[in-house]
Image: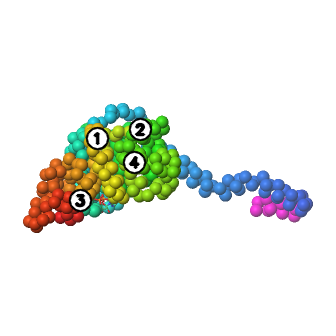
Amino acid sequence: SLILGLGAYLVINQMASVGIMFASMILLGRALQPVEQVVGNWRNFVSARAAWLRVRDLLGASPPAERTLILPRPAGQLSVESVSYVAPGSVKPILRNVSFRLEAGETLGVIGPSGAGKSTLVRQIVGVLAPMAGSVRLDGADVAKWPRQSLGRHVGYLPQDIELFSDTVAANISRFQENADAEVIQAAKMAGVHEMILRLPNGYETQVGEGGAVLSGGYRQRIALARAVFGRPSIVVLDEPSSNLDGQGDAALVDCVRQLKDLGTTVVIISHRPATLSAVDKMLVMRDGSVELFGSRAEVFGKLTQPVRSVPARSAEPKAVEAGAAGG
Ligand code: ADP
């Protein structure tokens, strides 16, 4: 407007021609274009500055991890001390004051009705979730504070929802560790899947596809078992490891648990299958997020069968466990 006004003034006073007025208007318009662009993009400058400040604050709040002392391989003594957990955004506690202790090399079977908090408990044991109160200790050291780089090597975990990565069978078993062929085969043999893998189209080099889509549910579960025992962890945690297994897979699982026991590995298994539970030393019965019973297998079986004994012909051990786990 100023340029136009000044041009008009000069033309009226016959100090410039109309052509000059338009020419200088165009020239000055071009010269001021960068300034106009800056003004037009001001919003972008402001948001970029705000984003940079946020990134700077975030990085400032979590500085690069300092080198922590690498703890030695744990023997596998597990102690769960008054663990309570409430899911974010919820008020009802999933775990309430759960405590028990396992010596290194002991095998624990966890049973209880659906929704009792069994999976949530084992997620605390492997360090996926941190308790709201209490602590889970492996050889006395708090799992939630254990340096992440080294904890994974000592813990084997077979979750309920198995996720295999889109790569070869061998890479999945070795947890992407390179040059571990002998250990991969050792883990597969231990899980009883070596022959099964050799029969796949490309053996250990078979691509499993996105989420292991190429394999059946049972195969996925058995390969995930091999992944859980890979590298001789100190503690192996199996969440419903036999849900997709046939009789042969079930027998391989029991054999694997026995081998782990012989190696002195601590094992925690959530399962309701009598065959799987036959291999455990101790039992934990969960109900509504609390420990209902904990003790040796015989002791817990004994307590679970007590109310059932009044009904004749229902005192067989496995049936009693199922009855106890399903609701009584
Ligand atoms: P279980 O393995 O004994 O069947 P879970 O540990 O899977 O039991 O779950 C126990 C209860 O906690 C369930 O009622 C489940 O819905 C609830 N729960 C588990 N995880 C979460 C979560 N992240 N947010 C909200 N509720 C959860």
**First along the sequence among labels 3 and 4:** 3
Q: Which portion, as a residue range, is magenta?
A: 1-13
Q: Is residue 278 visible?
A: yes
| 3D distance between C-alphas at marks 1 and 2 | 16 Å
Disc 3 residue type?
Gly
Residue toward you, 137 or 323: 323
Q: Position of residue 206 (x, y in %)?
A: 51, 49
| 3D distance between C-alphas at marks 1 and 3 | 24 Å
Query: How many neighbours does mark 1 have within 10 angstroms: few (below 14), some (14-19), or many (20 or more)?
Result: many
Q: Position of residue 224 (x, y in %)?
A: 40, 50
Query: Which residue is the site of mark 1?
Result: 265
**First along the sequence among labels 1 and 2:** 2
Q: Is residue 84 visible?
A: no
* Left or right, residue 47 beside residue 76: right
Disc 2 residue type?
Glu
Q: Position of residue 216 (x, y in %)?
A: 44, 58
Q: What residue is drawn where x is 27% and y is 36%?
A: 75
Query: Which residue is the site of mark 3?
Result: 112
| 3D distance between C-alphas at marks 1 and 4 | 20 Å
